Image (tube, coloured by chain):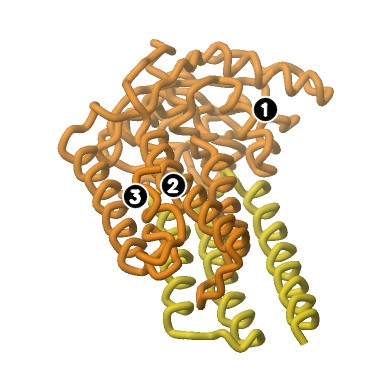
């Protein structure tokens, strides 16, 4: 084994019986490099929007299909597609991109019911589900089902109609896909007051393209870099522990098993972290 | 004396392992909630650091170098979770 690599990964008399990569100065340097690389990704994303983004293949029809499948499984009637609700969902998604926000209520206080009313849909009961950064329709619906408040909207007995929109755009410098799902119950009397509406889920807005491929996800890139650094540390700790154990080296140092357990736990967290947000 | 120390060290490690597995299981449930995920990441880093001080103090091996080592490794993990979110 070349001496440089041996010094980096194993304890030796030349590195004070501790792998060079685990020495304070090296850990500090690694931390600095890591922060610089992650910052570079953030800066790059801000100045070059669209280069990094989320690849998605979300078809609004599939969202409706999976939503209705779940309703049927729970003994509910399937929702009927309504063009006005679809237009309202589309308007809501476009508004989020235009005003650069991600919320049920816009920064100027516009509520989801405004878009429903503007579309000409008279409702007695309405709800909105939102999702972003997902890559396929099944994961969107699954995420909503996993969330009690969104699930409640999906299986709400009072809702009879649905509108879904999927729109690609740029929020905070990152290309993304927003899904707006609107639920409604028609009423003969027009109700324009937002207070009479009720958020049942997330609004799903779509530009009806239903398909986009924007590029490499910043999350995946960030995750890969993190995993590279953490695996390097885990390998070094494992080598270091093995040499200390085999050569019965006595030294003042942290508990390698505790470090390894901690870093493995962080690795698992990095892997299980789910892409996609719902509101 | 050495056997007692070894036993104590094993118990300490077991405590750390149980805490880590508990915190990790929370992250599985809250994988979609990014705020809670971030808090869990910080909690894990905090447990690693505090456990390190506690363990080495019990063992009588608490030195400045050891504290810095735990601090840096804890910080590394916490920053990785923040950068992901």
Q: Is residue B8 above or below residue A136?
A: below
Task: Give the CA separation, mark 2 to mark 3.
Answer: 18 Å
Residue A267 or residue A172, whichever sits in front? A267
Image depth: mark 1 or mark 3 in front: 3
Q: Is residue A99 above or below residue A140?
A: below
Task: Give the CA separation, mark 1 to mark 3.
Answer: 70 Å
The first of marks 2 and 1 along the sequence is 1
Q: Are marks 1 and 3 on the same chain?
A: yes
On the image, numbered disc 1 is attached to which residue? Answer: A159
Q: Is residue A80 above or below residue A129?
A: above
Q: Is residue A63 visible?
A: yes
Q: Are marks 2 and 1 on the same chain?
A: yes
Q: Which mark is residue A232?
A: 2
Query: On the image, which quarter does residue A271 sit in?
Result: top right
Q: Residue at x 26, y 44 (%)?
A: A42
Q: Disc 1 vs disc 3: Cβ atoms closer than 8 Å? A: no
Q: Residue at x 26, y 47 (%)?
A: A37
**Residue A76, x across and y down, in percent:** 79, 23
Q: Is residue A211 above or below residue A1?
A: above
The first of marks 2 and 3 along the sequence is 3
Q: Element type at marker 1?
A: loop
Tell me the colour chain A is drawn in.
orange
């Amino acid at each position: 084994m070349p001496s440089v690599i041996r010094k980096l990964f194993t304890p030796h008399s030349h590195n004070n019986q501790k792998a060079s990569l685990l020495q304070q100065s090296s850990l500090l340097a690694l931390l600095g490099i890591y922060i610089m690389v992650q910052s570079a990704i953030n800066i790059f994303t801000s100045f070059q929007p669209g280069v990094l983004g989320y690849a998605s293949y979300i078809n609004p029809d599939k969202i409706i299909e999976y939503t209705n499948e779940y309703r049927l499984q729970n003994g509910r009637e399937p929702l009927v597609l309504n063009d006005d609700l679809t237009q309202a969902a589309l308007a809501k998604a476009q508004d989020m991109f235009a005003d650069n926000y991600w919320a049920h209520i816009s920064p100027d206080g516009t509520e989801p019911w405004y878009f429903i009313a503007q579309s000409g849909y008279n409702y007695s009961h309405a709800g909105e589900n939102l999702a972003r950064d997902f890559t396929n329709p099944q994961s969107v619906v699954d995420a909503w089902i996993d969330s009690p408040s969104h699930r409640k909207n999906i299986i709400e007995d009072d809702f009879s109609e649905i509108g879904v929109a999927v729109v690609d755009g740029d929020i905070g410098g990152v290309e993304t896909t927003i899904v707006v799902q609107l639920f409604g119950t028609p009423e003969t009397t027009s109700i324009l007051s937002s207070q009479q509406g009720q958020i049942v889920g997330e609004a799903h807005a779509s530009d009806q393209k239903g398909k986009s491929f924007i590029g490499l996800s910043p999350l995946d890139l960030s995750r890969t870099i993190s995993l590279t650094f953490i695996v390097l540390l885990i390998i070094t700790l494992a080598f270091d522990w093995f040499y200390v154990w085999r050569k019965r080296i006595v030294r003042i140092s942290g508990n390698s098993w505790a470090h390894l357990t901690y870093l493995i736990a962080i690795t698992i967290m990095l892997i299980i972290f789910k892409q996609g947000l719902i509101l | 004396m050495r056997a007692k120390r070894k036993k104590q060290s094993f118990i300490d490690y077991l405590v750390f392992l149980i805490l880590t597995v508990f915190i990790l299981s929370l992250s599985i449930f809250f994988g979609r909630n990014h705020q809670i995920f971030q808090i869990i990441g910080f909690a894990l880093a905090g447990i690693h650091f505090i456990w390190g001080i506690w363990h080495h103090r019990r063992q009588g091996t608490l030195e400045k170098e050891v504290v810095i080592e735990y601090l840096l490794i804890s910080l590394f993990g916490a920053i990785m979770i923040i950068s992901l979110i």
